[in-house]
Amino acid sequence: MKIKHYLICFIATGIFFGCGETNSSISDSENITILEETQKYKDLDITIIDDPWKLENFDLRSTKVDNRPVFVYYTADGSVNSRYFEDRILSNQVVLTILKNQFTIFEIKSDDRSTYRLIKATGDTVIEPKSEMWKSYQTERYGVFETPFCDIVNFDNESLVSKRMNYSSSSPVSFEQWLHEGLLNFEKKNKQQSQYDDATNDTLEFDEYKVLSNVDFKKALAYSAWDNKPVLLYFTGYNCVGYDKFEFDIWPDSLVYPILRDEFLIVSLFLDDRSVITNLRDYDSVRTYGEYWTNYEIERYGIETQPIFDIINYNNESLVEDIATIRSHGSAELYRAWLEEGLSNFKKSN
């Protein structure tokens, strides 16, 4: 079953080694728009991304409709290297035409000094520039923080290229070849997924979001309010033994799937997530997000186990009398009745 989680790309500093232009074919498509020689990268349709959580849970999902790979570009307005990279590589007419006709373009400003509010695991609130947020994101994902730096991904946030391109490793010729690699792997993955779906009839998709920090959790609640759906709060883990009973047996059942797909927002909390909480202080009692959500489960429900489920509204108020577990709701009939209880109470409270 496909439960969607979603990606990003970046651009790096270094010494540029130039190469000549290329006249190689850009595409076999009949619907190619050939650009004017005066057009530049900045003239393309570019979406500016300002939040990693929104990127993975909303922005990338939206690209599935167009069925295009995503070129996400970390840049900096104040960077001489970024400006040179855009003029020399991204504005090359062959590269530019491929980007316009065959990619969705996401751009991230790594020097964005506008601020965001971060709620830490301790409950403390700090205000930091977005540049720090993107620095943490890029460093955790790629092990580097540099601009310009590029990746090609699909709507599942999976990288489609064998390496990332940066300022020092790119020429118009090598960049064109790199784009073609991403396009080819995008088509291969789509074909493989289609074959898998045909073989398993695995076409289930839900509004499902993996929550890492408390900030993510509050954003999910805000989205619940906007979408007017109750939240199915799902305490699980990467090594959770019982999750497959629900995700592969109960959720796909014809009694459960329609109501779960159409009426709920699924928010997943991973109790064994070993990612270290950002901006930790020496006296913080928890070190990882998994520890934080485990403590949350114990404090709220008095137990430490997985998987368990609760149904809440956007005020984080429970809408059911009891939580659901394998022992208490381990059949499609019982689980469906429990979902209906929560949905009914949600509608009554609105």
Image: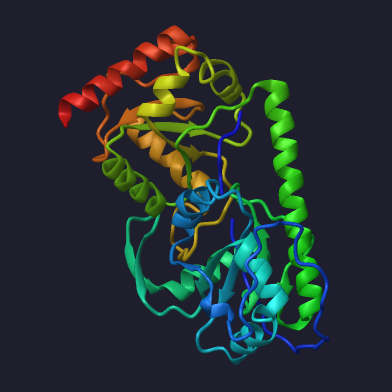
Residue 303 lies in quadrant? top left
Outermost residue, bottom side: 80
Residue 121 in view, yes or no: yes
Image point 63% across, 25% down: which residue? 202
Residue 302 in view, yes or no: no
Rendering coords of residue 76 (x, y %): 53, 82
Would residue 172 be found to the left or right of residue 335 on screen? Answer: right
Q: Nearer the viewer, residue 107 or 93?
A: 93
Instruction: Assign the N terminus to one quadrant of the image.
Output: top right
Image point 75% across, 61% down: which residue? 27
Image point 16% across, 29% down: which residue? 349
Outermost residue, front side: 30
Rendering coords of residue 57 (x, y %): 48, 49
Would residue 190 be found to the left or right of residue 245 on screen? Answer: right
Instruction: Assign the C terminus to one quadrant of the image.
Output: top left
Is 296 rendered above or below residue 81?
above
Q: Nearer the viewer, residue 216 or 303?
A: 216
The number of discs equals: 0
Image point 27% across, 29% down: which residue? 318
Rendering coords of residue 58 (x, y %): 45, 50
Would residue 277 be found to the left or right of residue 101 on screen? Answer: left
Q: Nearer the viewer, residue 202 or 44?
A: 44
Rendering coords of residue 186 (x, y %): 71, 50
Is 201 rendered above or below residue 25?
above
Residue 319 lies in quadrant? top left
Q: How is the image coloured?
A: rainbow
Residue 191 lies in quadrant? top right
